[in-house]
Amino acid sequence: TCGICVEKCPFDAIEIINLPQELDEEPTHRYGENSFALYGLPAPQEGRVTGILGPNGIGKTTAVHALAAEITPNLGRFQDEPDWETVLEAYRGTELQEYLEDLKEGEVTVARKPQYVDRIPDTFDGKTSELLSGVDERGVADDLVERLGIASVVDQPIDTLSGGELQRVALAATLVRDADFYFLDEITPYLDIGQRVTAARLVQELSADGRSMLVVEHDLAVLDLLADALHVAYGEPGVFGVVTPPKSTKAGINEYLKGYLENENMRIRPEAIEFEEHAPRSEGYGDTLVEYPELTKSYGDGEFTLAVDAGEIRHNEVLGIVGPNGIGKSTFAKLLAGRLEPDGGDFDVDLDISYKPQYVEIDRQMRVDSFLRSITDEFGTSYWNTEIAGPLQLDRIMEQNLTDLSGGERQRVAIAACLSRDADLYLLDEPSAHLDVEQRVLATRAIRRYTETHDKTAMVIDHDIYMIDLLSDRLQVFEGTPAERGHAGRPMGMREGMNTFLANLDVTFRRDERTGRPRINKPGSQKDREQKREGEYYYAP
Ligand code: ADP
Ligand code: ADP
């Protein structure tokens, strides 16, 4: 096995490789005998956004504890902890020397945004405005509230906010602080693409003010847009992690996708993650699973109205669904499931839909294996292990309690639960949230393979454009004004779908010449103008 899956490789990975070995040198920090060890440290730089790209459990948080002086790096000498002088000596002549000297003198102030924003209501009891005014050291809260589009929730108690609102409030609460070093552990979960781009801009603006920004991010299109330099983190999650010296963002992402780090001469994955440069897969002519007429649905006195164009979902396809938050995507799903009656249009098919909501709530005092066994009789069969448990990396967490899972673990259990139910249509809302890049790719394959081999159909709502690209056969584009008016187009081919969607956002992608990876064009650049003129926003020739 390649070490990712416990059983036989579900993807028949061609070569068996040796995964990275622990380095034969002094670590930066080791928690104890036979405990996790971290090698290297990211180097925050004034006026720059530094990214970290790597799996969960690889020591990113440990590194930040060190950079915030919450732990003194022990250089592996956990029995006889070194003092700061010794640590400084170890880093003399490196990019970190100056930063660590300031840190030792107590001259670095740190602000950080936690990874799991869903937990904020457990620790803060009050309104959004109270949370923000308590930390608004730079006096810019009003401006950030406006730009992040959270003005409508400032008077609401924190525990009534949705995940997407909490994410933006948490970002605002971090960026309003007056700090030298900002650490942002994921900025994109629960945000739509427009919100992701805004978040990226705000981080960049603050760095231009001479601050050091360090960002962990798994949405590669956003990381590419955001970071001035990139550290790749690799190793064996939970055992050891290595943070590379900084690379250019482009080289770092390309090497990561290739699975091979050039300077380090290190293979970190058996195979490359590749993007198709042309609109992928023929549209196919699968049988029709369901055909629906034009539909409309309003809530209340027409506070929100959704209009759906007539269309069809094909048997055995993965239909990607894109569009902003609050535009009617879940409402459409409820219409398909017969859980809501349309106001206009005649549609009375009740599809049996297995649904994974955007915000996963499976907090029960129950073990993962008992939970999944209660959902499917196939639990534990070799087929289920190969198709579901393996790719979703569930083996290591089967005996844990649902309540003890991290965000990424909970997401994987929820995807497994969704796919394990018997249904006509599988609807997954933001399966990428809190998954690292590796896990996104494995989850994508699991969903695709499952629909192919099980003769099933899936609809996947996601805002990670790479994941949507890798996952979908066709696209359905939602547009309009969030919380007022939504329009759902008919499902269409990938090229037409991406063009429609990205034209709404006014964003074009070019292809990295070496890897074919899509990269966001600078607005107004020659490529951007050319592609807009030709109407080719994504699969440009
Ligand atoms: P990441 O932020 O990349 O997900 P972390 O730095 O949180 O990773 O954790 C890396 C590893 O270090 C994990 O296996 C974690 O269990 C372990 N770890 C974290 N804190 C401690 C600690 N105080 N004592 C022992 N092990 C720890
Ligand atoms: P999406 O899935 O695209 O985020 P939704 O379909 O959940 O969007 O919601 C679209 C709009 O309808 C939002 O403004 C939401 O607040 C509103 N809405 C959703 N459900 C209801 C309901 N039961 N009653 C009133 N308004 C609702």
Image: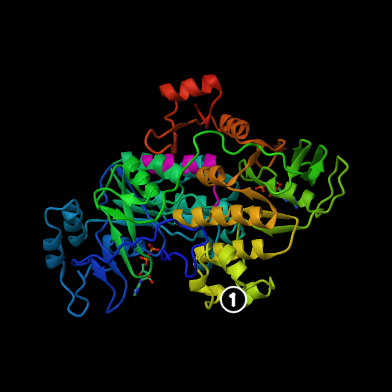
Q: Of 170 and 503, which appears nearest the observer?
A: 503
Image quarter of residue 491: top right
- Determine whether the residue tagged by mark 1 lies in a helix, strand or loop: helix
Mark 1 residue CB less than 8 A from any atom of ligand 1: no
Residue occupied by mark 1:
369
Residue occupying the point 67% across, 42% down: 327
- Which region is colored magenta? 190-204
Residue 481 seen in this snapshot: no
Give residue 79's position: percent from left, percent from top.
20, 80
Q: Is residue 388 inside the magenta stretch?
A: no
| Residue density around tag 1, few if under 14, some if 14–19, many if 20 or more, within 10 Å | some
Magenta: predominant secondary structure element? helix
Figure check: 334 above or below 381:
above
Residue 225 point in image, percent of width and height: 41, 39
- For image coordinates 83% across by 38% down, the residue present is 293
User: In the image, is 3 to the left or to the right of 327?
Assistant: left
Number of marks: 1
Using the image as rendered, state which of residue 444 and residue 175 is in the foreground. 444
Question: 129 and 405: which one is in front?
Answer: 405
Q: Is residue 355 visible?
A: yes
For the N terminus, the image quarter is: bottom left
The quarter of the picture where residue 381 lies is bottom right
Drawn side of residue 215 relative to residue 124, left or right: left
Task: Please name the residue shown 43% across and 59% down the image.
Answer: 114
What kind of colouring is applied to the model shown? rainbow
Q: Position of residue 98 (x, y in %)?
A: 17, 52
Q: Is residue 291 left or right of residue 95?
A: right
Q: Residue 316 at x, y = what percent?
A: 70, 49
Q: Identify whether 540 is placed above or below 375.
A: above
- The kind of residue on which mark 1 rests is Asp
